[in-house]
Image (tube, rainbow, N blue to C red):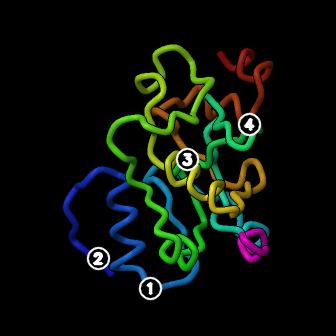
Amino acid sequence: ELIPFMNFPHGMKIDMFLRYIIPARTVFICDDDAYCMRPLGAELALLALPRTAVVSLRPRVAYRIRYGGEDHLPMGTYALLINREIVVREHIRFHSPRGDSHRRIFNRPAGFKNGLSFDTGDYANERILELGYAVRYGEVGGVRGFMALTQPRLLLECYGKERVKRMI
């Protein structure tokens, strides 16, 4: 079914769809340039584990979220399996709050998204951890895509540095 929808900020669209449009318990969201390379049975099994709110199939790797004295890989919003019941019941929001009152996000490269502010999904990631739920991660390579339209990066991931060097 095609649903016409305004182009609101990414996190706000996720919140609206999870709360008002999608009735399913398990929801798969992904960017339009993400591609599943295999069935997601293993990731669905991870989502079924107790207290699992989200399974990230393509987490962010440029920085970490620090919570409870530990570093956590940010789940991002590139490709996620979501337990919608937990997200809705616990009022977890993907739309980032204004300002930077929490600042648990750290270790970002210089100039990355204006320093310490939340990127889409980071606030939800933090709330999931605060509420004692888990963010789990799918198998590497299950989802591929064009991160920032970088064909060279995709070639490196698929074929490795030495082979790409020989190709060019």
Marked residue nearer the N-terminal end (2 or 3): 2
Q: Which residue is located at x 56 percent, y 55 percent?
A: 127
Q: CA distance from mark 1 to mark 2?
A: 15 Å
Residue with the mark numbered 4: 71
Marked residue nearer the N-terminal end (1 or 2): 2
Disc ID at residue 23: 1
Q: CA distance from mark 1 to mark 4?
A: 33 Å
Marked residue nearer the N-terminal end (4 or 3): 4
Determine whether label 2 and label 3 are within 8 Å by CB. Answer: no
Q: Residues within 10 Å of mark 3 (few under 14, many from 20)?
A: many
Disc ID at residue 2: 2
Disc ID at residue 135: none
| Residue 49 sits inside the magenta stretch | yes
Position of 46 with respect to 91 (left or right) is right
Say which of marks 1 and 4 sits in front: 4
Q: CA distance from mark 3 to mark 1?
A: 22 Å
Q: Which residue is located at x 39 percent, y 62 percent?
A: 14
Disc ID at residue 76: 3
Question: x and y percent of residue 150 in the render?
Answer: 52, 29
Q: Residues within 10 Å of mark 4 (few under 14, many from 20)?
A: some
